[in-house]
Amino acid sequence: MTLLHSPTLDAPEKSDLTLGFLPLMDCAPLVIAKEKGFFSEVGLNVQLSREGSWASIRDKVMLGLLDGAQMLAGIPLASTLGLGSPRIPMVTAFSIGLNGNAITLSRELLAEIDELGHHPSDSSAAGLKQLIAYRQASGRPKITLAMVYTYSAHSYLLRYWLSAAGIDPDNDINLTVVPPPQMAVTMKKGLIDGYCAGEPWNSVAQEMGIGSPVISGYQIWNNCPDKVFAVLESWHDAHPATHQALICALIQASNWLDMPQNSEEALNILLGHAYLGPALSMLSHPQLKQGNRLFFRYAASYPWRSHALWFLEQMQHSQQLKEETDLQQVACQVYRPDLYRSVASKMKLSHPTIDFKPEGFHDNEWVLQGSAGAVTMGSDLFFNGGTFEPNRL
């Protein structure tokens, strides 16, 4: 893997930008684009603003206090639909990698499951289902599990995992929202029994001795999407060249991050106090690639409309989306692979030429015909053998 071609782009309409991020491993493309000069190479002067919650990032982008941000993939979809916030359309033309999440259960909960005869290393939720039934029969309180945001990959992966074992996420347990940096301390206080979150917060719980990851997002869905870089649709319309420059810089940063020789330097940059310092300082051996995280390989930065459609269908299955909605129309409005392809072509980067792809059919690497040769893709199996094949437009 080598550095990509630096194209000649139109001058950005706005060069001084403020972008938001949360202290998670996958803020790395934004951090590296700034610290390694990829933003400045395309004429952008970027300041990164560390935020405390996903709701804060969503609201600040909506209010124009942030030009764009690292976001959960569900945020621009939910905002465009008016779910949990005013109906304000957003777009994404860049996926911030694959994988990186895990489900962590508390030490006490794992001990209870073990007492019922289920080994804690069992990655299914079968033991949890038995414990739920036992607690119900004995009149004990429901188990409480947290996710980072209602409309997030974490929420849908957690629901998918629970449902596969016959657990009703809306009735058999309590589901609550906790910002990622507060997950471990909230579990330590006994306020939640487990959570689904991105790294480093699963590793932090393990280092603190208060819980252990039982299954990773990768195990639930091989090479599952998680975060995106998103802006308001109106912001894109007013700043198309600036948006193009941002996409170019983020592609360069993601490619740089997936070069093995850069891992140590990237970690040292992320360890800076302004980024992930306080969280990573708690870990004995922090790793950038925890949870099978990829930033560039397997077209990890490509904004697949089929991924958007999967999230939208999960919203529908969870009864979060109550009104009749054309899911494909929303997926195509919010996810803009056409913008990605425009930039990738100028960078002479071979990229997918389709917007939708099936999931759950490949147990190993496979090849997709790209714009300038083959694009190698990764496995995409669901842990329960499920498949997802979106209808083509």
Image: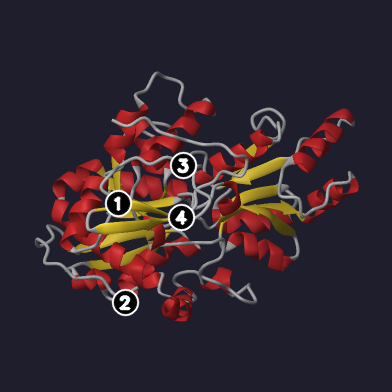
Q: Earlier in the sequence, mark 3 or mark 1?
A: 3
Left or right of 94? Residue 272 is: right
Q: Are marks 4 and 3 in contact (CB under 8 Å)?
A: no
Q: Between disc 2 and disc 4, whose residue precedes?
A: 2
Dot 4 falls on a residue whose secondary structure is loop
Q: Which mark is residue 67?
A: none
Q: Say whether residue 262 is visible.
A: yes
Q: Nearer the viewer, mark 2 or mark 1?
A: 1
Inter-mark Cα distance, 2 to 3: 34 Å
- Vertical order, 196 against 317 (above or below): below
- Which image quarter holds the N terminus? bottom left
Residue that label 4 marks? 378
Q: Which residue is mark 1?
A: 369
Q: Quadrant of the C terminus?
A: top left
Labelled pair 2, 1 in contact (Cβ < 8 Å): no
Q: Which kind of residue does numbered mark 2 sit on?
A: Lys
Q: Secondary structure at mark 3?
A: loop
Earlier-in-chain disc, 1 versus 4: 1
